[in-house]
Structure formats: structure tokens, C-alpha cells
Image (cartoon, rainbow, N blue to C red):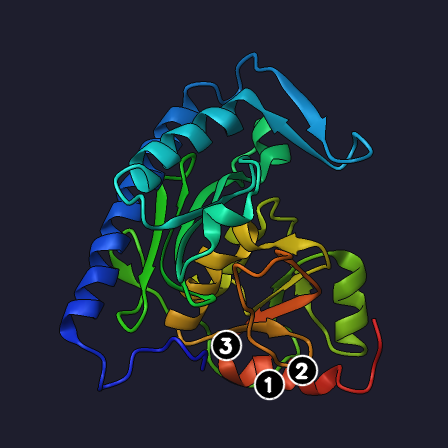
Amino acid sequence: MPDTELSAGQTTDRATDYAVHGERLAAAVREAGALALTTFRGPLKSWFKGNDGQTSPVSDADLAVDALLRERLSVPEPGIGWLSEETEDRPEQRAGRLVFVVDPIDGTRSYLAGKPDWVISAALVEDGRPVAGALYAPVTDELFTGVIGRGAFLNGARMFATTGDDIDGIQVAGPQRLIDWVRGDAGFVVVPKIGSLALRLARVAQGALDAAFAGGNSHDWDLAAADLLVHEAGGALTTFSGEFLSYNRPDPVHGALIAAGPGRHAALIDLTRDRRF
């Protein structure tokens, strides 16, 4: 398990602090989701960002949600750093042990297309690992929450990743090219594309998917909250070499990743051990 798992020697006060932050994150993403719904499927200004002007879309809704989340989370906690997809990254903003890691709308393409598979994602990261997190899917009114050592929940009901180590016939989601590389001769059932990477991973925590994959070029804000959910649901999210992720590094980009319940996670890692993607 990741190093941030609570141990018996950690204080009740620290665990309570995580829980308080978890409640604040949950309230913030729910409020932000309500704001995003006010412009969903309506006229909205959007454009492309990135060095080549075509990397990924952003809209006025992304910026409005980002501003709301910062007001609800960062302003009351000025000692906690801030890392958001839609805020200019400045190293001094996230130099401490604690940082909020936020994706105002994960799945902006789906949002702009009027599809339901987008979420508001927010996590508290301590020393490189998430300790509290929340995802909210406003269209389906699904609130995913987790606090380290206290489990993962969907609308208040405990979630668990699927068990077992058989991989034939398992339900998976992710980039098709990566799925084809992983499965070899195994008979995966590939579900329709889930536009939000955070939601795709949360479906593993929920047990709705047996495994999910992320191609290269995912970022801290796509992953931090969902990472906590998967692990608190008894699963694992790692690189294909089995390494846990570290957040709030100078470069927030990550390579190809795999999420699954423990048995299948180990089996899929073993299946790809001698291959190169």
C-alpha cells in the first residue's frame, strides 16, 4: 500500500483533520457541480489551450468552477498549496507538504458535447499522496468520497473494487490501443468510452469496472482524488511496473497506468511484464 496509509501510531487528531477536509472537499465539488450544470448543454465560450493551440479544450465553465473551488478550499486554508488544471502553476503555490489538487471539470470534451461522463475532482495531497478526495458527477448525481484509512463511498454507501485474479471476460475501460496491448489473448469486455479519466478510475473503486487504464500524459489533477478512491476501495492504481504515484512533483505528468482490484491488478501487471508499450 502507499506510504500514506494511516498506521496505529498516528493520532486521532490527524485522522479527524483528514475527515474534516474530506467533508469540505465533498461540499465544494457538489456546489461546483451545481454551478457547472447551469451552463451545461447551453451556449458557452470554449477554446483550445496548449503550446500548439490544439492540446485540450477549456471553457468559461472550467474557469468559473475553478474560481469557486479556490474560494471554497484555498481561501479558508491559506497555508495549503494549490494545483489546478485551470490555474497558472507557480512553484511557490505548492511548496509545502499539503496541497489541494483540483480538476474543475475532468472530461471537458464530454461536457462541451453534452454527454454525462464528466466530473468535478478535488483532493488534498500530503507529502505526495492523497489523503482526502471527492469526485462529483453532476448529471448522474454521483458523489464519490474517500478519506485515508476510512474507506471509499458513493453517495454514502461503501464501495469496494472487484475481487478475484481471473482476467478472462473482465470489464475494462481505457484507450483502445493500450487495452489491445494489455490483453493479448485474454477476452476482455471493453465498455464504451468514459470521457473523464477520474470517473473511469472511480468506476473501478465502485466495482462497476474490473480494470481501467490510462495512457501517457495524464496529470496530477486527473488522478489524485480517484487514486485515493481506488486504494480505499481495496484496489490499486500504479504504473505498469507496479509503482505507486507521487503527486505535487515539479512535473505533474504521469505515464501509462493501471487500476484494478488487488488480484487482477497483480495478474495484469504479470501479463505485461515482458512487453513494451
Task: Using the image as rendered, state which of residue 92 and residue 145 is in the foreground.
Answer: 92
Amino acid type indicated by mark 3: Gly
Q: Between residues 34 and 131, which one lies in front from this camera angle?
A: 131
Local SS, label 2 = helix
Element marked by disc 3: loop
Q: Which tag, 1 or 3, sits closer to the chain's start? A: 3
Q: Which sits earlier in the primary sequence, circle 2 or circle 3?
A: 3
Number of dots carrying numbers: 3
111 lies above or below 107? above
* Left or right position of 191 against 35: right
Quarter of the view holding residue 234: bottom left
The residue that disc 1 covers is 266
Q: Are marks 1 and 3 in contact (CB under 8 Å)?
A: no
Residue with the mark numbered 3: 261
Q: Which residue is mark 2?
A: 269
Labels 1 & 2 near each other (Cβ < 8 A): yes
